[in-house]
Amino acid sequence: MTLQVSLPKKPGHDLVDSCVYGPVRSRRLGWSLGINWFAPMTKVCNFDCVYCQLGPTDRLPRREDFVSPAVFTHEVETAFARIASTGIPVDVITISGNGEPTLHPQTPDLIDRLLAARDRYFPTARTWILTNGARIHVDGIAQSLNRLDERAVKLDGVGSWFVAVDKPLFGFRWETFVEGLRKLRDYHLQVMVVKGLGENIAPAALAEWVEWVHRQELRPKSIQLYTVDRCPAYDGVRPLAPSEMAQVADRLVQALPGVPLEIVWPE
C-alpha cells in the first residue's frame, strides 16, 4: 500500500471564505458539509500546530474575526437551501473551519442555530465538531457540544511532546482539559502523528501518552489516527508511511484494549 500525499502549494491553502463549504464526497462519511464561523480566510486558533494545513497561527484573535450569529444564520440558511435544492443527500455536517471553533464567544448560540437549520434542511445528517478541547470546560460549551451527534477532541501528545507538536499559545491547561472531557457524554480522540519537526512517535512519547490516558481514566468512544496529507504550517514536518502508522496503531491497540482504533488515510 502506498500513502498518497497531495500537498497544496502553500500553507493556508485550506482557509475558507464562507460559513458553509462543500459538499464534498468522502469515502468514509458520504456527502459532507463544513461549517466555519470565523472571518473569511482568517485563522483563529490558540494552538500553532506544526502540521496545520491552515498555516501558522501568527496573531491573537480579534473581535472582527468572529462572525455574528445573524450573519452566520443568513449564510447557513442560504447555503443549506441552495444545496438542498440540488437533491444532494448531505450525510455529515462538521464544525471546524478556520481554526478552533470553541474560541467563538457565542459557540452555544451558533450550535443552536446550526441544529435548527440542519433539522429543517438535512434532518438525517449527523453533526460533528473537531476541537482541541481547550475551552470545553467553559460553562455552556460542553452542554452545547453534547447536543451534536459526535465530538472529536485532539490529543496529539502529552508533556514535552504536546508542546513540540501542538505549540499551545494561550488558554490551555491540562486540569481544565480533563474537566471538560468529563463533561462530554462521549468523544473520539484524534491523534495526528508526524515525523521530523514536532515528531511524536518515539516509544517514550507513545508510552507517556498511553500512561496519561490511563491515569486520567479516559474512556474515548474511539481513537482516530492520522498523519500529514496537506502542506504543513512549518517546513520539516513529514508524514508516516503505512508501515509506521501500523506500528503506532498496534502500540495503542495493545495498550488500550477495547477502544476501537481507526487509521484515517488521505482521501
Image: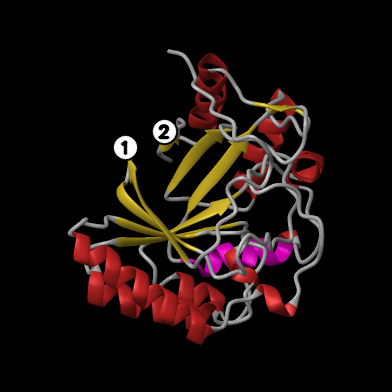
Report which quarter residue 247 is drawn in: top right
* Residue 242 to residue 127: above or below: above
- Mark 1 closeness class: few <14, some 14–19, many ≥20 residues within 10 Å: few
Local secondary structure at mark 2: loop
Residue 156 colored in magenta in the image: no
Report which quarter residue 150 is drawn in: bottom left
Residue 181 colored in magenta in the image: yes
In the image, what residue occupies the spot 80% across and 66% down? 60
In the image, what residue occupies the spot 71% across and 32% down? 200
The answer to the question of whether label 1 and label 2 lie on touching residues, with beta carbons closer than 8 A, is yes
Give the mark nearer the N terminus: 1 vs 2. 1
Quarter of the picture holding the C terminus:
top left
Residue 195, percent across and down?
70, 25
Residue 77, percent across and down?
35, 77
Q: In the rendered image, which residue does mark 2 sit on?
A: 267
Relative to 124, is 217 on the left or the right?
A: right
Nearer the observer, 103 or 245? 103
Quarter of the picture holding the N terminus:
top left
